[in-house]
Image (spheres, grey):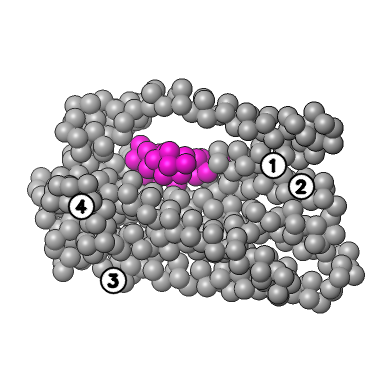
Amino acid sequence: MFLADDGWLGWSSEVSPARERGKFVTLNHVGFVAGMAAGLWIGYGMTFWTSSEAGKYWGWRVSILIQLFPAFIFVIGLPFLPDTPRWLIQKGQTERASRVLHALHQGTTSPDLITRELHAISSAVGSSPRSYRQSFLDPSLSLFRNRSLFARLWRAFLLQFMAQMCGAAAMKYYLPTLLEALGLEYRLALMAGAVEMTTKIAMTVVDMWVIDRFGRTGCLMMGSLVMGVAMTINGFLPLLFPGNVSKLADSICVAFIFIYAMGYSFGLGPAVWVYSSEIFPTAERARGLNLAASGGSIGSILVSQIWPVGNEKLSSGVYLVFMVINFLCVPIIWSWYPETKGRTLEEMDSLFRKPSARHHSNVVAAESTSVNRHEEDDVAPLTPGAGEGIEAEDVEHEHEPLLSVRRINHGTI
C-alpha cells in the first residue's frame, strides 16, 4: 500500500514537468480507480458462479488470485524505473541525476535549460537543514518543528481527512446497501456499484486534462460543490417520499449518487493526491505524504463507523450531515490552500512562508507568469547568486517572504 499510495505518487510528482505534473499524477489515480472497478465487476460476475458448490469453494480464492497478476507486473517493472533526479542529487549523484533528467526530457528541452533545472534542484536540495538528518526521528520531527514544513503538513493532512469525511468512504463501502434501500435488487445493486466505479474512471481521465488548466484548488472546490448538491438531493427526497413510494424520486437519488461519484473523481479524489505529493521538499516528501495519508485513514474509519449508525438513526438525514461537510470544504480550500498549478517543486517553499496563503499564492503567480512567457519549458533556471538566495531564505528567514518571492521568481521559472 505504501508503494501504491505514497511512494509511487512521490516518484510521479518528482519526474513530471511542472506544467503537466497534475496530469501525470492523476494518471496514477486512473489506474487506482480502474483496479477498483475491475474488482467490483469481478465480484458481480462471481454472483453467477457462487450458486454452485464449486463456485462457493473457488469463488473467493479465484478473486484473490486475480489480484496477484497486476502486483506481479508492478514488481517486475520496478527495476526499470530510474531514481528521481532530486533523490539522486540528495545522495550526491549529480552526474547520474543529469543523465536521468536528460532522459526524462527526451529531446524536448534544450540542454541549457536542463542544466539550469539541475542547478535549481541542487540549490533547493542543498538548502534543506542538515541537522534534521542526523537521526532516524529528526526528519519526521522536522515536519512539526519547522514552521514552513508544518504549514504543508497540516494542509495535506486536513485535505486527506476531508477527502474521506465528505462521504466517499461510505459510498465505497456501503454503496450496494444504499442502492438496495432505493429499491434496487441485490444483484442489480452490485452491477450499479460497478457501473458507478467505471464512471469514476471516465471522470478521472477528464480531470487529467483539466487539473493543469483550472488548477488544483479550482477542481477541489468544484468537486465539493457537486458532491454537496448530490448529498442534498439524496438527503431530502427520501424524506419527502419515504418508503420508496415514488419510483421517480428513487431514480433521481440513484442518478445523483452517480453525479456524486463524478464530482469526487473530478475533485477530492485525484486532486488531493496531486496537491499532497507536490508541496513537500524532496527530503521530507515521503514522510510528509505518509503522515498526511494517515488523515485519510482516520477519516475513512470515522465515516465507516458513523454512516451505519447515522443511517439507522437519521435514515436519509445522514446525507445532510455530509452535505454540510462538502459545502464547508469550499471556503476552507479557498482560504487556506494556495494554488500550486504550474509551479516547479523548487518554488513550493515560497508559498508556505506567509500566513495569508491565498494572497501569497496570487503574488507568486503574478510574478512567475511574466517570466514563464519567455521560456520553452517550465524548468528552473537560476541567475548567479539565486541559489544562495534560496538557501538562505528556505527555512530560517521566514520574516522576509515578499523579498524571497521576488528573489526566487526573478531568477527561476
- Marks 4 and 3, how far apart in space? 25 Å
What secondary structure predominates along the stretch shown in magenta? helix
Q: Is residue 213 visible?
A: no
The reply to whether discs 1 and 2 touch (Cβ–Cβ < 8 Å) is: yes
The numbered mark, 3 or 2, whose residue comes first in the sequence reads 2
The reply to whether discs 3 and 2 touch (Cβ–Cβ < 8 Å) is: no
- Give the left or right position of residue 177, taking residue 91 as reference: right
Q: Can you give x and y, in whole percent of width and height, for residue 294 in the image?
A: 43, 55
- Give the left or right position of residue 411, taking residue 70 as reference: left
The numbered mark, 4 or 2, whose residue comes first in the sequence reads 4
Q: Which residue is mark 4?
A: 138
Which residue is at 26% across, 61% downward?
Answer: 144
Q: Nearer the viewer, mark 1 or mark 3?
A: 1
Q: Which residue is mark 2?
A: 190
- Marks 3 and 2, how far apart in space? 47 Å
Residue kind at label 2, given as amino acid type: Leu
Q: Nearer the viewer, mark 3 or mark 2?
A: 2
Q: Which residue is mark 3?
A: 355
Q: Nearer the viewer, mark 4 or mark 2?
A: 4
- Magenta stretch: give its range: 1-30
- Marks 4 and 1, how far apart in space? 42 Å
